[in-house]
Amino acid sequence: MKTKINKSLLEQGYELPLMEEFYTIQGEGFHSGKPAYFIRVGGCDVGCHWCDVKESWDASLHPTTAVDLIVKNALKFPGKAVVITGGEPSMYNLEYITLQLKLQGIQTFIETSGAYNLTGEWDWVCLSPKKTSTPLAINYEKASELKIIVHNKNDFEWAEKNAQYVNSDCKLFLQPEWSKAKEMMPLIVDYVMAHPKWNVSLQTHKYMNIP
């Protein structure tokens, strides 16, 4: 069922189309294994064919929710980090939500394709570029972590292309696409061993059977 969206509150960042929110253990990349509160917003036009949350693509399927309520919910848990993901969270004005979280002493993390201008104040930016909609140049500069999803052999070339644009402190990760993990993992292992600037990222939450 589609929901009515208040465009004014959405544009000001006071509401977001909330798909789900939950407290869990981070499963991927640099912060894997750490507790965090996840906020998944609806809306994405990047359209990765292997996306495992396609139900997030249509923002109108997810009710716009007051950011103050989202922050209040996050504060119920002992973890002091919030990960905003999607969908594609950079589609939205994230200034207000990051301000409110940081006022409460919460670290702000984001997972984004970088296809849109990134707003808000972030402690960690996980940039995961997609071939269907490449990142804006300015978002490469903001990346704390570059995470490339490896679906086929050509993605190693794609990874190196993107690695040219990030800052020197950015952490580099190669992560097998889940449905191709058995096939691609040996190639990733060999590649990382031969190119040690890269690290392996796994979707450990799927192995642990948690969100």
Image: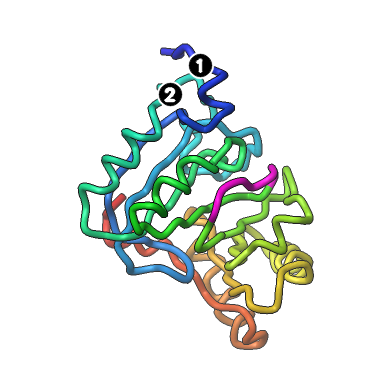
Q: Secondary structure at mark 2?
A: strand
Q: Is residue 146 left or right of residue 181?
A: right
Quarter residue 156 falls in: bottom right
- The residue singled out by tag 1 in the image is 6
Q: 123 and 52: which one is in front? A: 123
Q: Position of residue 31 (x, y in %)?
A: 42, 68
The coloring applied to the image is rainbow
Query: Is 7 rendered above or below residue 37?
Result: above
Quadrant of the rendering where the N terminus is positioned: top left
Distance between mark 2 and mark 1 Cα atoms: 8 Å
Q: Position of residue 64 (x, y in %)?
A: 43, 24
The reply to whether callout 2 and callout 1 are in contact (CB within 8 Å) is yes
Magenta highlight: main SS: loop
Q: Secondary structure at mark 1?
A: loop
Q: Earlier in the sequence, mark 2 or mark 1?
A: 1
- The residue singled out by tag 2 in the image is 64
Q: Is residue 167 left or right of residue 57?
A: right
Which residue is at 41% across, 54% downward? 102
Q: Is residue 190 left or right of residue 53?
A: right
Query: Is 146 rendered above or below residue 7?
Result: below
Q: Is residue 97 left or right of residue 176?
A: left
Q: Position of residue 115 (x, y in %)?
A: 69, 45
Which residue is at 36% across, 61% downward? 26
Magenta-tinted stretch: 115-121
Which amino acid, by three-letter code, is at mark 2?
Thr
